[in-house]
Image (cartoon, helix red, strand yellow):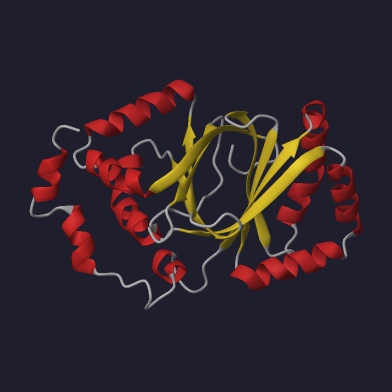
Amino acid sequence: GPGTDQYRNSPDSWFKSLFVRKVDPRKDAHSNLLTKNEESNLYKIQFHNVKPDCLDSYNKLCEEVLPIIHADKYYPCELVGTWNTWYGEQDQAVHLWRYRGGYPALTEVMNKLKQNQEFSAYRKERGKMLLSRRNQLLLEFSFWNEPVPREGPNIYELRSYQLRPGTMIEWGNYWARAIRYRQHNSEAVGGFFSQIGNLYMVHHLWAYKDLQSREDTRNAVWHEDGWEEVVYYTVPLIQHMDSRIMIPTKASPLQ
């Protein structure tokens, strides 16, 4: 677009700064370069495609069971948020869990839930309502805030990016700077990248008062000096992307 060449030539160009920093991905795993520290939280995101006529029963079932696991200190995990999709995918539920202490915490929770008869009954009941399900294990980017409970009402947008293999570090470098452009309305909730499941996948989670406020907030950022450059350099890193607008369910700590 117009004006993009000036970025390339400007002495403080981000493009040059990428090479100045010379991250050699072979020296360190991507996950270590991009996360907060060794004790990083592990996250699990679940996508459940629910039979359309079962969504209400499914939500009711989740509202009975998920908060109990969340509140019980016996399980080292927390429910970050739980939603139904509104636009994008339809008849889908999305759950986001945090495991403090990483993989050992995840394993501990899984093993303990296997022994829990109520949870087994819940899974069996839930199974009758689902068409399909998939999950991913995620780590959080170091430069995003950890998601904390929010008062509502909000709508949430989950933007998911399938990146070209090998571009995660570059993505992280741009967004580490770009995130400040997107904090004006406290809209940034969390940023994650996949470890297991679809690989080279990034999820950005945003909160807005409503669809109009989402539109206004996203339009306003184009007036920020430097945002155009972020878009110019990150778009080529993306192979595929999609967006879901989601509504929190009653049990969600993110309202």
Q: Position of residue 149 (x, y in %)?
A: 56, 46
Rendering coords of residue 193 (x, y %): 49, 56
Q: Position of residue 154 (x, y in %)?
A: 54, 31
Q: Left or right: 46 with respect to 26?
A: right
The quadrant in which the C terminus is found is top right
Residue at the (91%, 50%) spot, across then down: 121
Q: Is residue 174 left or right of residue 159?
A: left
State the residue at coordinates (44%, 53%). 145
Q: Quadrant of residue 131?
A: top right
Location of the N terminus (image quadrant): top left
Instruction: Please determine whether, in this image, residue 88 is positioned above or below residue 34.
Output: above
Identified at 65% across, 56% down, the residue is 78
How many numbered badges does the structure rendering display?
0
Residue 53 appears in view = yes
Quarter of the image for residue 212 reads top left
The foreground one among 111 and 172 is 172
In the rendered image, the residue lying farthest to the bottom is: 27
User: Nearest the camera: 178 or 169?
Assistant: 169
Q: Is residue 113 left or right of residue 13?
A: right
| Residue 71, x across and y down, in percent | 72, 54
* Residue 74 shows in the view: no
